[in-house]
Amino acid sequence: MKSMQELDDLTGTPARPTSINQMRSQRAELVERMKGILAASERRNAPLTETQTAEFRDLDLQIEDLTARIQAKEQSDRTVAINAMQENAQVDGWADRAATAILNMSEHRAVVSGSIDIPQLVSPNVVADPYNPNRLIDLLVNREVLRGNAYEYLQQTVRTNNANVVADDGEKPTSVFTVASVDDRARVIAHLSEALPLRLLQDHRDLRTWLDTEMREGVLDGLETQVATGNGIGENLGGVTEVSGTTPVAFDTDRITSIRKGRTALQVLHEQPTAVAMHPADAEAIDLVREGSDGGFLSAATDLDPVFGGLQRVITTSIPEGTAVVADWSQCRLYIREGVRLDVDTSSGDLFAKNQVRMRAEMRAGFAVLRPQAFAIVALAASGGD
């Protein structure tokens, strides 16, 4: 058996996987092959043969090489993430900037009704693949700034590669890569606060915390819900679980088996999934699976590596319980038309008399699924039950 380096030398073409997910997936496959060699020896109740010993050592070297490269890649990704955080400090400091702008709305530091623009609640620029993503939005690495409200994109509806060997003077096969032009527009995502005591706005720290945990999170939750389950009707965006042309994967045995089937379904289509998104209840059920009735948790060991193949996991209530989305998330695009506008009202109705304030936060954004087949919609429960 040739090592990856030997294959490189023989073919002149790198045989190594390049992305961290591919490296993790290949490492998991090599580990399974090593386990298979040991299991075969145990079944025969005999020591490893010379051939098996050589193959085992070769696999061990490849795993060692992949582990070193994964660690280097992880360190590199961390550096990229840190740089991105520094470059996009405006995004992370949204609540602080919003609080400062509100408190400065009046020259005399008295909060009055008005409107302020607080851009970059979500970075509008293309971002690197996330390291330990916390939100579904983190997976949307393909982003674009809109100069107007409307936008057009190309959606690939058929992807059939018929490339093959061709004899001299023979007719070349035709591959079918069908794309359709889709026109869409940005939608407003907004929410209002209840009437609050005006004194909340007189302390920068309290105001910043409230803006971050309530107004900011509310807008992001609304955007995530649309990206996940928007039905494209009326003012709804077309979310990944509702757009036509995705890859359906039926429930098979249990959640873990079904997710692995989702990876296979995409691999058969020559898609490279980058992450899996699921509801917290489904993630909990997977994390609590034990080896046997009273064994250790599978999630505490490497036994789930062959299932997820190193894919990032995002746990979000935006994905319906009983469903997982295994996907190449670069095959969708987030459009940002307007960062966030924050409106402050202290004078309408009874607000002035009661010394209260209401706020409205809103953004304008669009969403496109560029290649629906790259999104496997996996059922994690049998029809009618778990």
Image (cartoon, helix red, strand yellow):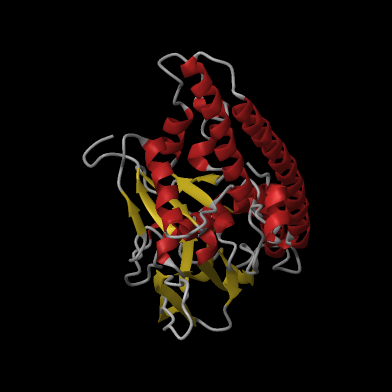
Q: Quadrant of residue 47?
A: top right
Horizontal and vertical percent position of residue 235: 37, 71
Q: Is residue 150 left or right of residue 300?
A: left
When the figure is inspected, residue 369 is found, relative to residue 208, above or below; the finding is below
Q: Residue at x 52, y 68 (%)?
A: 333
Horizontal and vertical percent position of residue 365: 51, 70
- Which quadrant would the N terminus be assigned to in this image? top right
Work out which residue is located at the far bottom of the displayed protein and give it. Answer: 169
Q: Nearer the viewer, residue 331 or 358?
A: 331
- Which quadrant would the C terminus be assigned to in this image? top left
Q: Nearer the viewer, residue 117 or 294?
A: 294
Horizontal and vertical percent position of residue 31: 58, 33
Number of dots carrying numbers: 0
When the figure is inspected, residue 343 is found, relative to residue 266, above or below; the finding is below
When the figure is inspected, residue 223 is found, relative to residue 379, above or below; the finding is below
Horizontal and vertical percent position of residue 173: 41, 78
Q: Is residue 199 visible?
A: no
Work out which residue is located at the far left of the displayed protein and give it. Answer: 384
Q: Nearer the viewer, residue 316 or 13?
A: 13
Q: Is residue 152 visible?
A: yes
Q: Nearer the viewer, residue 19 or 284?
A: 19
Q: Residue at x 49, y 23 (%)?
A: 40
Q: Quadrant of residue 347?
A: bottom right
Q: Is residue 140 left or right of residue 164?
A: right
Q: Quadrant of residue 285?
A: top left
